[in-house]
Amino acid sequence: MSNEPVIAIAGVTGAVGAEFIATMDRRKFPVGKLKALASARSAGKTLDFRGQGIVVEGLNERSFDGVDIALFSAGGSIARKFAPVAVKAGAVVVDNSSAFRMDPEVPLVIPEINARRIREHKGIIANPNCAAITALVPLWPIHRTNRIKRLIIASYQAASGAGAAAMAELVDSTRAHLDGEPFQPKVMPHPYAFNLFSHNTPVDPETGYNDEETKVIRETRKIFEDEQIAIGVTCVRVPVLRAHCEAITFECERPISEAEVREILSSASGVRIVDDRANNYFPMPVDASGQDDVLVGRIRRDLSDASGHSIAMFVAADQLLKGAALNAIQIAELLPERAMA
Ligand SMILES: NC(=O)c1ccc[n+]([C@@H]2O[C@H](COP(=O)([O-])OP(=O)(O)OC[C@H]3O[C@@H](n4cnc5c(N)ncnc54)[C@H](OP(=O)(O)O)[C@@H]3O)[C@@H](O)[C@H]2O)c1
C-alpha cells in the first residue's frame, strides 16, 4: 500500500459518509485518490474533497479496482454483497454495518480497547454498533482494573443513528407539528416530533429484545473478550438530531468507589469527564455533537447495591463520529499495511 492510499467510500452521500470525508480532512489522513461511491440515484453528483470536486459513482463490481482501503457505510446488504468484491480486488475493508461484526474471522475493533486485533484481519474489519461504542469506551478502563460482571444500559438514541433521512424526518415532522399540519412518518415507524419510542429495529418475539439491544450485548462480549459479562439493555429513540446518550449502571467484582472511577476515567483515552454537580451540568447531545470524546458524568454510587460494587453514570457521544466515521478512520490509520508502506 502506498503512503497515499487510494480510498473508496461506499455510502459517501449518507450521514456517516459525510463524516468520513470531514474526519479524513480533520485528521489529515493521507489520500492519493478518493473514489466516492453511492447508489445509482447519486451517480454524477459532485462532492468537495480538499478543494477538489469528486464525482460520485454508482457502486458496481469494478468500483474497487486499484483501491487500497474501502470504507463502507451503505448498510448490511450492500456490505455483504460488495465487501468481498473489494477484498478480492485487493482492498482492506472497514465496514460500519452489522453484516460481519459477529463473524469470528472478522476483528470487531474499538482502537482504544483492542487495536491489536486489527493485524489479524483477513480483509474485513468491522466497526461496532454505535450504542456499543458509546458505552464501551469509558467502561473498558474500568473493566480492565476491576472486572465488570454485570452491566445495565438504557439508551437515548438520536435520529442521526438512523441516517440522513431520519434526521430530515425529525426536522420536517417537528415543523409540521408546530404548524399544526398532519405528518405521515415514512422513515421511522412512529411519530418522532415531541415523542420517543422503543428502538426501531425488529423485536425478537421470544426474548422481547430488539436487534439494537442484542447487538450491544453480543458485541460487548466479543470486544471485551468476556462471554460471562451479564448485560441488560433497553434502547430508545429520542427526538434529538445528533449524539446518543446512555444511562449506565455496572457492578464490579470488587468494591469500587466513585473516586476510583473518576481517577480511572480522568486518564482514559477517548473520554472526557463532564460532571459538574454544583451547576447541574452533565453530558448532553449538544455538547457531544462534533466531538471525538465520549462525555461521562453523573458518576455516583448505585444506591441499589449496598455492597459498594456498583456505579451509575451518564454518557453522551457523537455516534456519527466515535460511533461510526471516526472509529473507522482510527482503524484505517492503524492498518499494518500502511505501516509497511
Ligand atoms: N448513522 C450512524 O450513526 C451509524 C453508526 C454506525 C453505523 N452505521 C451504519 O452505517 C451505514 C450507513 O448509515 P448512514 O446513517 O450513513 O445511512 P444513510 O444516511 O441512509 O446513508 C446510506 C448511504 O448508503 C448508500 N446506499 C444506499 N443504497 C445503496 C446501494 N444500493 N448502492 C450503493 N450505495 C447505497 C446511500 O446512497 P444514496 O444517497 O445514493 O442513496 C448513502 O450514501 C448503515 O449500515 C448503518 O447501520 C450508521
Image (tube, rainbow, N blue to C red):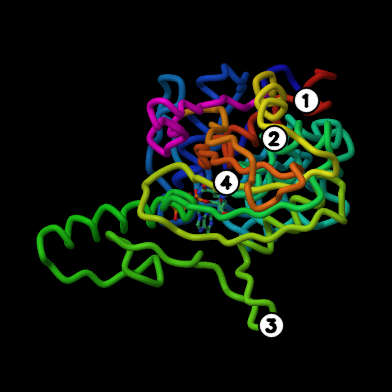
Q: At label 4, which amino acid type do we have?
A: Ala
Q: Which residues are magenta?
A: 269-290
User: Of all residues shown, which one is farthest toward the front?
Assistant: 306
Please tell me which of labels 1 and 2 falls first in the chain.
1
Image height of 273 relative to 98, above or below: above
Residue 76's label in the rendered image is none
Which residue is under mark 1? 1
Image height of 331 relative to 242, above or below: above
**CB of mark 1 near ligand 1 (< 8 Å):** no
* Mark 4 burial class by Cα count in 10 Å: few <14, some 14-19, many 20+: many
Please tell me which of labels 1 and 4 falls first in the chain.
1
Mark whose residue sits in front, 3 or 2: 3
- Location of residue 310 by image quarter: top right
Q: Are marks 3 and 4 in contact (CB under 8 Å)?
A: no
Which residue is under mark 3? 206
Percent x, y for residue 255? 80, 38
Which residue is under mark 4? 10
Please tell me which of labels 4 and 2 falls first in the chain.
4
Quick check: 115 left or right of 13? right
Which residue is under mark 2? 69
